[in-house]
Image: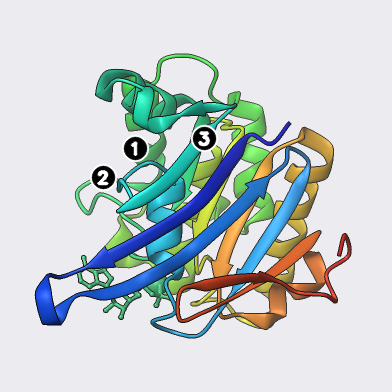
Amino acid sequence: MSVLSLQHVNQFFGSDSARVQVLNDVSFDAEPGTLSLIVGPSGSGKSTFLTIAGGLLTPTSGEVLFDGTSYHDTSKHNRDRLRLESIGFVLQAYHLLPYLTVADQFTLVDKVKKSGNLSHEDLGILLEQLGIQDFTHKFPAELSGGQQQRVAIARALYPNPKIILADEPTAALDTERVKIVGALFRQLAHERNKAIVVVTHDVRLDEFADQIYEIRDGILTKNSTGTFA
Ligand SMILES: Nc1ncnc2c1ncn2[C@@H]1O[C@H](COP(=O)(O)OP(=O)(O)O)[C@@H](O)[C@H]1O
Ligand SMILES: [Mg+2]
């Protein structure tokens, strides 16, 4: 069964003559063990899609199901819990806290979510994989954009969520780092049974995906060249 399902989702922004449709009858399923890539140009609705998939925004119409249960039928308290325990977000703006060192970004997660996070050893392996193990005493402002992006990826993976939603996670990375991140996401999907959904305009990630979708003007279509197509 899919762990995350969007069914006939429409999203409008604005009102009256300024009303625009940003998602148009979008249906999508994420299975555990797969890396799904949604590729589209700027303004096509990618971030809106991901925000709705993560339950941060309620769509104008349509359903979002998590493990078969509608977000809509879940109390705000339970939705917040679900997000905290089961969904790892890698957001476009990184969302690192400026007054905390890299190490403390993880300590903060421990305070909010007290159990089920990666062990100290596994976190060390992850930081090394991402090449950021030497920056743990630095503040975000002391890091490059690409380094901050990798810290944000590590922080999203740290709570060991079963779903990972990533918005342009490789935009600031050179091609070698893109390959590392692509391989890491694929490994987490295939070996740890995560459902990973990446929205991006970075075609350098294509080779790592199990399924590829295209989004254009809010319309999502499965790419016929995708592995499972
Ligand atoms: N909160 C909002 N209010 C009004 N328009 C929005 C809002 N969020 C996004 N949009 C518009 O929706 C369209 C899609 O945006 P977005 O989902 O951010 O696309 P992408 O991530 O693919 O660049 C854009 O035209 C954007 O201006
Ligand atoms: Mg975006």
Q: Decide: marks 2, 3 in contact (CB < 8 A)?
A: no
**In x, y percent, where is residue 205?**
71, 72
Tell me how far mark 2 sits from mark 1, CA to CA: 6 Å
Which residue shows up at 74% across the image and 43% down it? 188
Front residue (pair 209, 65):
65
The earlier-in-sequence mark between 2 and 3 is: 3
Label 2 environment density (alpha carbons within 10 Å; few <14, some 14–19, many ≥20): some
- Residue 19, located in which quarter of the rendered image? bottom left
Q: Which residue is mark 1?
A: 104
Nearer the camera: disc 2 or disc 3: 3
Residue on which disc 2 sits: 100
Q: Nearer the viewer, residue 80 or 149?
A: 80
Quarter occupied by the C terminus = bottom right
| Quadrant where the N terminus is found in the figure | top right
Q: Is residue 19 above or below residue 155?
A: below
Q: Would you identify the image quadrant in which residue 180 lies?
A: bottom right
Q: Of the residues shown, which amino acid type is indicated by label 3?
A: Leu
- Across and down, in percent, residue 20 comes to 26, 76
- The alpha-carbon separation of the residues under discs 3 and 1 comes to 33 Å
The mark found on residue 47 in the picture is none
Q: Nearer the viewer, residue 8 or 31?
A: 8
Q: Identify the element where label 3 is drawn.
A: strand
User: Residues at badges 2 and 1 in contact (C-beta under 8 Å)?
Assistant: yes
Alpha-carbon distance for marks 2 and 3? 35 Å
Q: Amino acid at mark 1?
A: Asp
Q: Is residue 166 visible?
A: yes
The residue at which mark 3 appears reads as 65
